[in-house]
Image (spheres, coloured by chain):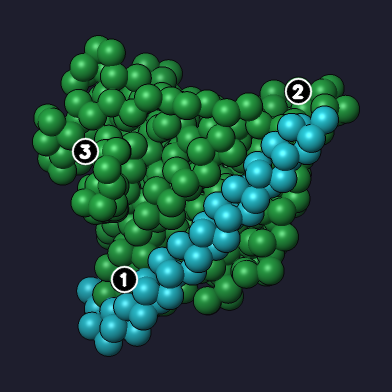
Chain colours: A cyan, B green
Amino acid sequence: MLDNFSVDRFFEALPYMGKGMLGIFIVIGVIIGVILLLNKLTTRKKSGK
Amino acid sequence: MEILYENFLRLFESGGWKYVVMWIIGGLLIFLAIKKDMEPTLLLPLGFGTIMVNIPLSGAIAQTVEGVTEMGPLTTLFNAGIANELFPLILFIGIGAMIDFGPVLSNPKLMIFGAAAQFGIFFTFCAAAFFFDINDAAAIGIIGAADGPTAIVVALKLGSKYLPAIMVAAYSYMALVPIIQPPVIKALTTKKERLIRMPYKGKSISKTTRILFPIIITLIAGLVAPSSVALVGFLMFGNLIRECGVLDSLSETAQKVLANLVTIFLGITIASQMQADKFLQLDTLLILGLGLVAFIIDTAGGVLFAKFLNLFMKEKLNPMIGAAGISAFPMSGRVVHKLGLEADNQNHLLMHSIGVNVSGQIASVIAGGLILSFFS
């Protein structure tokens, strides 16, 4: 375990933290947008009736 | 008689003590399941399986004696249901059928906390990278998804040899959410913040939205991270069965019989990997420690993100709801609700916290998919 210790690997991993969190926020943002749109569209249909 | 004596003596051979330690671990898991009611559906089979596979020359797992390999039933089950990711994915159908996405569909903005509370995954991944190869570090980081099936699928796809430790950490800490989260939440919030009330303005959600939601989520997640299609797809398929309104019988089966059946085999099959030689290593202890870090940072990430948003909001949020984004459905939602009531017995946060909690479930699967797309 300790013989495998590597600071370089930590720095190799660091950019993925940024990419990963950014990716999650973007995907969740898109999903939020889609839900808002869906809610709007389906509510409109109801009021149209 | 001589054979019986020989088998018994194996316990006293060099390394024989390890079997006894594994029996104690198995016993502890069974104790936690029965006495403390901690994830009993998983910890009990896991505990019993641990004892079964740690009997010298156990016939429950494959054994090679004098060059001849004899398959054991647990090894066969592992190859048939875990190594190919089938069991966790089938379990996802049941979980999807159990989840009501109503609170999220009613207030989709809550989903943002589900994203923030995945920070523990990537933080732990970076911390694990100090000690483990990148793929193993990523598999260890996914303990922070606080979601057993996601942790199993990601660890398997990344080819991590630490699957048993990752599994035990993921499920144990999920069960320990009511113990882990409250001190972290209290340390990061003031009494005044915990008192913030959030009136629930529930909107009725059309059936069309409920049906389209799982389909669209699968499409979005699949397009962004194709590796996540199986994870997201099975979860959303289960939810579609629930929401379509014409498969009530299947929905009920998926929620109860299917989920229970797979869980029985999942626990005992994963135990086949908890063999003393593989499990009793310093690496395992380190993974358990990193898993705890993942849950703490997840909780902190959600709470601090809510506090950050409060800087810009007129109508303040109770920052505790951010902690429910950790997934671990529905324990973490309930923990936040209880803490709200503890601060003020009229402060009902359940609908918000469950909404965030469900979002955490989706976000954790997406996080798993992203990790897979980065490293597999």
Element carrying mark 1: helix
Q: Is residue B336 left or right of residue B259?
A: left
Write down the residue under mark 1: B126
- Residue plotted at (13% across, 31% down): B192
Q: Nearer the viewer, mark 3 or mark 2?
A: 3
> Is residue A49 in view from this perspective?
yes
Q: Earlier in the sequence, mark 3 or mark 2?
A: 3
The C terminus of chain B sits in image quarter: bottom right
- Residue under mark 3: which chain is it in? B
- The one nearer the camera, B8 or B306, is B306
The N terminus of chain B sits in image quarter: top right
Q: Is residue B373 above or below residue B321?
A: below
Q: Is residue A8 above or below residue B77?
A: below
Q: Earlier in the sequence, mark 2 or mark 1?
A: 1
What kind of residue is marked 3?
A: Ile
What kind of residue is marked 2?
A: Glu
Q: Is residue B238 left or right of residue B291?
A: right
Q: How far across and down, in percent of the image, does residue B277 sit?
A: 42, 56
- Residue plotted at (76% across, 32% down): A46
> Is residue B46 in view from this perspective?
no
> Mark 3 touching mark 2, by CB under 8 A?
no
Q: How far across and down, in percent of the image, does residue B50 sit?
A: 48, 39
State the CA–CA distance, disc 3 to disc 2: 36 Å
- Residue plotted at (25% across, 78% down): A5
Q: Which mark is residue B252?
A: 2
